[in-house]
Amino acid sequence: MKKSIIISYNYPPVVGGIETYAFELISFFKKNYSNEYDFIFNETQKPVTGIFRAMSFMIFIIKTIFKISKEKYKTIHLTNFNLWFIGYFYSLFNKETKVILNLWGLELVYSGKKGFLPSIYNFFLPINFIIKQDSFKFMISSLASKDLAIKNGFNENKLFYIPLGTNSYDIPIKRTNNEEYLFFSGRITPRKGLSWFVENVLCEFPQLKLKFSGPIVDKKEFDKIISSNQVEYMGVVSEEELVSLRYNSLVVIIPNTKDIKNPDFEAFCFVTIESVASRSIVLASNYQGLTDSLLNGKLGFLAEPSDKKSWILQLERILKIKNNEKQMIIEERLDLLEKTFIWEKIFAETYNLHNE
C-alpha cells in the first residue's frame, strides 16, 4: 500500500497559527496513522527573518525534494502554500499523486501588494500558474478564505473547507481569581488592534485592567500599549498559564483592525476557539476569519472592527451579564464548540480528503 506524507516548514518552537496547526496535525497522524504516513517537518526552525529565513526556506525545499523523490506517495499534504514547488516537481514524475496545499489567504493579500518585495514574492509564488495544476487541491480554513480565493481565480471545485480546531481543557469548576480583568493573547503587532483598543475603548472603563501576553513582534505597538496604567504585560506564558488567564478573565478580547494602507488577512483565529474551550467569554472583531471561527456570533460576541462605539456597547452588554446567565452561555458555547471545532473531528475530515 502506498503511503502519504505530510510536510511542514512552519513548526514549533516558533509561535504562530500555522506552527500550531502543523504540530497538532502531525502529532495526531503520528499517533493514529503512523503506518500510513511519513512526515517531514522543520522542528529545528528558529525565529529568523529576512535573507536568513529565505535561505533556510530554500534549503528546506531542496532537502525535501531530494528525500521524497526516492518514494512513491499517494498524497502529499503541504501545510504551507509557498511549498508548492515541492508538490509541482514531484508530480512531474508522479502524475497519479494528489497534492494538497493549505491556503491561508495571507499569501493572496501579499501577492496583490505593489513594490519590489511583493514582485519578488510573486516570482517565487506564481498564483496563476499554481492554480492551473491538475494534481493540486487546496484546503481552506474559513469561508473568508474561500471568498478571497475565488476572487483570485481559484476553481471553487478545488477548494475544500476544513476549519481549524482546538483541544478540550480540564478546568476546575470554581474560578480561582477574584481580580477583574480583560485578557488578550497573541503576537503584538498593529493588525491585532490592541493599542487601538487601549486608546479608544479601555480608557472608557477606568475600573478595568487589561492583561496581555504574547511575543513582541512590533516594539512601537508594544510601547503604545504599556503607556496605559490600566495594562499589565504577562510575557510569553505556558499553555497551562494561558488557559488559567483566559478562564479567570471577565472577557477575552480580539480587536483586530482594518488597515487600508497595509492590508492583511486573518484566515482563522485559534485564540477565539481556544478561549471558548477555556470557558471564557469572547469579544472579537466582526472581521475575516474571526467571524467564521466564532460561527457568526454563536460562539462569542462580535463588534465592528475599528468602531469605538460598537466595541463600547458590546463590552457594556457583556459586563451586565449576571454570573448564572454567564455560566449558561459558556456551557452552551462549549457544547457547540465540541461539535464543530475539536481536532479529532477536523483531522478525520482531513484524512478523508487525503484518501477519497
Image: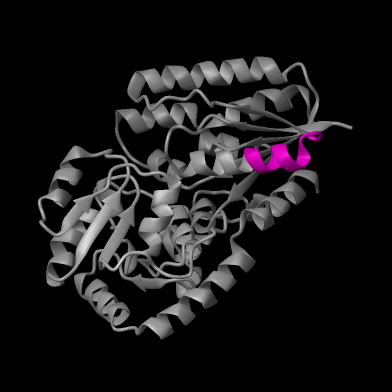
Tell whether position 33 is magenta: yes
Q: Is residue 224 left or right of residue 318?
A: left
Relative to 93, does residue 286 appear above or below in the rendering?
Answer: below
Residue depicted at x 33% and y 42% = 236
Q: Which residues are magenta?
A: 26-36
Residue 13 in sight from this viewpoint: yes
The residue positioned 63% from the left and 68% from the top of the image is 339
Q: Is residue 34 above or below residue 243?
A: above
Most foreground residue, 56 or 143 = 56
Q: Position of residue 222 (x, y in %)?
A: 19, 44
Q: Is residue 166 left or right of residue 339?
A: left
Q: Which secondary structure is most common in the magenta stretch? A: helix
Residue 105: percent from left, percent from top:
47, 47
Please tell me which residue lies in front, 321 or 48: 321
Q: Position of residue 239 (x, y in %)?
A: 44, 47
- When asked about the image quadrant of residue 178, the answer is bottom left
The residue under the point 65% across, 19% down is 65
- Residue closest to the eye, 262 or 234: 234
**Where does the N terminus fall, quadrant-wise?**
top right
Let me know if residue 284 is in the magenta part.
no
The relative height of residue 191 versus residue 71 in the rendered view (above or below) is below
User: At 43% across and 70% down in the image, what residue appears?
Assistant: 174
